[in-house]
Image (tube, rainbow, N blue to C red):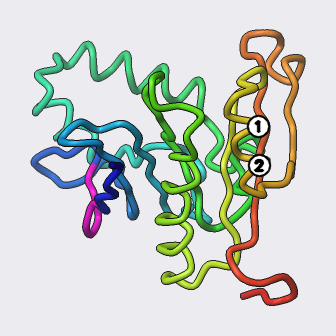
Amino acid sequence: MTQIRVLEGKKVVLTGAGGALAHTIGAALLEEGAKPVAGASAFEMNPHDYRPLSLERLPAVALDLGWSEEVLSRFLVGYAQVWSNPHDPTLAPQAPWIIECVAVVPEARGRGLTRKLFEVLFAEGQRLGHARAGISVTNGNLPAQRAYEAIGFQLYLQYGSDYFDGAFPGTLKYRIPLEPQGETK
């Protein structure tokens, strides 16, 4: 039998002596017996900076990770090259409540576990007052696309491979209402 365990409070993904580098507000883990079989997380998008990490705490995290000054410097340079614009349109939120890191072990796929994960994360988004949730998927990940569309996510925006000069297959952004149709916050 599948059990759902909601990870309570703010689940910190990366921490350092100075606090969180990135954090998750909601997370759910599905277990069978004591074995995790599926998990997902969600967060509120920062409207002022769409980039995936808050770098002000990175030096403390790097110290905890045992990074040398050279490694930290290379990371910062690379990060700045990739994410120079805090309002990069490819990172613009399609909804205020973003679901990410959805994973189901191969032997448990096709059993509706993604739907169970999303029920937990949708409820948390509603509790926080959000009217919509969003999720992104890499172009070509057809199993994920089919799962999200079956749950009710609608395609919001798509960036093809050409947008990324062929360096990335592209991304699809989906969103779904968290409240009955016609009601918005």
Q: Residue at x 25, y 67 (%)?
A: 8
Q: Residue at x 81, y 10 (%)?
A: 166
Q: Residue at x 37, y 43 (%)?
A: 55
* Mark 2 Cα-neighbour bin, 10 Å: few <14, some 14–19, many ≥20: few
Q: Marks 1/2: CA distance? A: 6 Å
- 173 left or right of 116 in image: right
Task: Give the answer, above or below, for where 7 lies relative to 163.
Answer: below
Residue 131 percent across, percent down from the top left: 69, 79
Task: Give the answer, above or below, for where 164 lies relative to 92.
Answer: above
Please state which amino acid type lies under the numbered disc 2: Ala
Q: Which residues are magenta?
A: 7-12
Residue 146 disc label? 1
Q: How many marks?
A: 2
Please state which amino acid type lies under the numbered disc 1: Arg
* The residue positioned farthest toward the front in the image shown: 1
Which of these two is toward me, 181 or 16?
Answer: 181
* Mark 1 Cα-neighbour bin, 10 Å: few <14, some 14–19, many ≥20: few
Task: Give the answer, above or below, for where 89 lies relative to 117.
Answer: above
Label 2 sits on a secondary structure element that is helix
Task: Give the answer, above or below, for where 43 lies relative to 113.
Answer: below
Q: Residue at x 45, y 23 (%)?
A: 107
Label 1 sits on a secondary structure element that is helix
Which of these two is toward me, 147 or 55?
Answer: 147
- 172 left or right of 67 in image: right
Residue 49 disc label? none
Residue that numbered label 2 is attached to: 150
- Asked whether 175 falls inside the magenta stretch, the response is no
- 137 left or right of 123 in image: right
Contact, mark 1 vs mark 2 (Cβ under 8 Å)? yes
Residue 128 percent across, percent down from the top left: 50, 81
